Amino acid sequence: MNSNFKTVAWALDASIYEVNIRQYTPEGTFQAFEKHIPRLKEMGVGILWLMPITPISQKVKKGELGSYYACSSYTKINTEFGTEKDFESLVKTAHQYGLKVIIDWVANHTGRQHEWMEQHPEWFAQDAAGNFTERNGWDDVVDLNFSNTAMRAALTRAMHYWVEQFDIDGFRCDMAHLVPLDFWVDARTSFSKSKPLYWLAECEETSYHQVFDTTYAWAWMHASERVAKGEVGMHEVYNVLHDYNQYPTGALKLYYTSNHDENSWNGTEYEKYGIAAKSWAVFTHTWKGMPLIYSGQELPNYKRLKFFDKDTIEWADSTPALHEFYKTLNTLRKEHPVIIHGATFNLPSHHHAAMAFIRHDQKDQVLVILNLSTERVKMDCSHELLKGAFTQVFSGMTYTFDHTVSFELMPGDFFVYVKA
């Protein structure tokens, strides 16, 4: 991390919940989503990340409704979701419940119909013939021209608008590595005299931690998927985690079993991980980093949500089945700072798709045991820290450990023990 930037304290033990407003309710509005905030607070969520709330370009749009990520303005609200007052109300309600709100910020490109285009065509990338263009094969968007200082200033002003007007708490920056790092440095520096914000980057470039508090854990995700397919063993996951450990002090990684891209394009967590989906979710909340929960994962949601068309999440009238599961994990992070700040000791599992580790400091220990396979696994865990009474957080039962503990895990099983 750049010594000029420090992660806001409230983010460190928070879990992030990604909100897909369009698909969240039949109405697909801020007002309809706002009613879910008390439930999400009760589930232990700390930060709401709203997918882009700006209007969508109608030119060359995808599907019936278009892509959230092809905006026609940086300072207007998508009228499908409601009004400025509705969004203001959502943020206020979240703050009343102690939740923070960050918005998705798409700085690399706009839709093919954007309010800047007529007055400032030079703010956009153009080919030799003067046509607007882009470099990633996304035919519904146009790249911004970051060599233009006036465009940069306007984009930064637009970010300030959302903080000043609606009191948001930070940004999730889409495809951040496609945008020059010096733009992000300048943008975050420009907020140095305003309220402290949280900055999440969709990228895995170590250098971007000069600006961003948290970056995506794509390499970990791909390794975990390969374990699920039986292509590699846990050594590949540990190698990635070791690489992450070399990141600058204070840099955090974002761990998740699903998000909007994964769910729609690559499949639900159950398609990817099968019986180990919950076990991997336990990992995301207990390893050092930031956990992400995507809209509907608490149901659980077994369907891929359409990206460009209406496809409502099917909430039941009763409490979501995994509400307590995620609440337990979120509470664990709040009550045991060792998960945020402690060291990690990996215990040998002697199995190609199981892992065990201890998060520890001088006062506290948390033991995590995960069977990420479709087989029954026997495991002996030995360590000098495994001495005394430990409580299993999902069952509430307390056991006495004497340095060595034997476990038998059914496929997909997970155990988390805290020092009693």
Image (cartoon, helix red, strand yellow):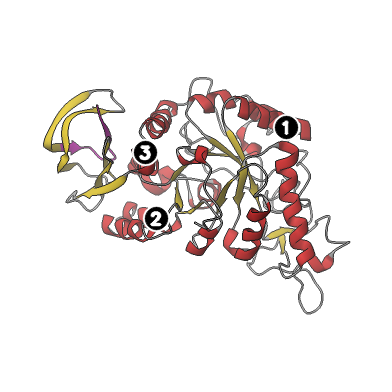
Q: Is residue 352 left or right of residue 219?
A: left
Find disc 2 in the rendering and name its residue. Answer: 220
Gap in angstroms between the C-alphas marked 3 and 2? 16 Å
Q: Secondary structure at mark 1?
A: helix
Q: Position of residue 260 (x, y in %)?
A: 55, 46
**Residue 163 shows up from this direction:** yes
Please tell me how crowded label 2 is: few (under 14), some (14-19), or many (20+) other residues with Cα within 10 Å. Answer: many
Q: Is residue 176 left or right of residue 399?
A: right
- Highlighted magenta segment, given as a residue range: 407-420
Q: Position of residue 128 (x, y in %)?
A: 78, 79
Find disc 1 in the rendering and name its residue. Answer: 88
Check the picture and name the quadrant holding the C terminus: top left
Q: Which comes before the other along the chain, label 3 or label 2? A: 2
Q: Residue at x 73, y 67 (%)?
A: 145
* Predominant secondary structure, magenta span: strand
Amino acid identity at mark 2:
Trp
Gap in angstroms between the C-alphas marked 1 and 3? 35 Å
Amino acid identity at mark 3:
Lys
As for residue 408 lying within the magenta part, the answer is yes
Q: What is the quadrant of residue 331 in the picture?
A: top left
Gap in angstroms between the C-alphas marked 1 and 2? 36 Å
Q: Nearer the viewer, mark 3 or mark 2?
A: 2
- Callout 1–callout 2 Cβ contact below 8 Å: no
Q: What is the quadrant of residue 280 in the picture?
A: top left
Q: What is the quadrant of residue 179 in the picture?
A: bottom right
Amino acid identity at mark 1:
Glu
Q: Which comes before the other along the chain, label 1 or label 3? A: 1
Q: Secondary structure at mark 2?
A: helix
Q: Nearer the viewer, mark 1 or mark 3?
A: 1
Q: Which mark is residue 278?
A: 3
Q: Is residue 365 left or right of residue 96?
A: left
Reply above or below: 165 against 199: above
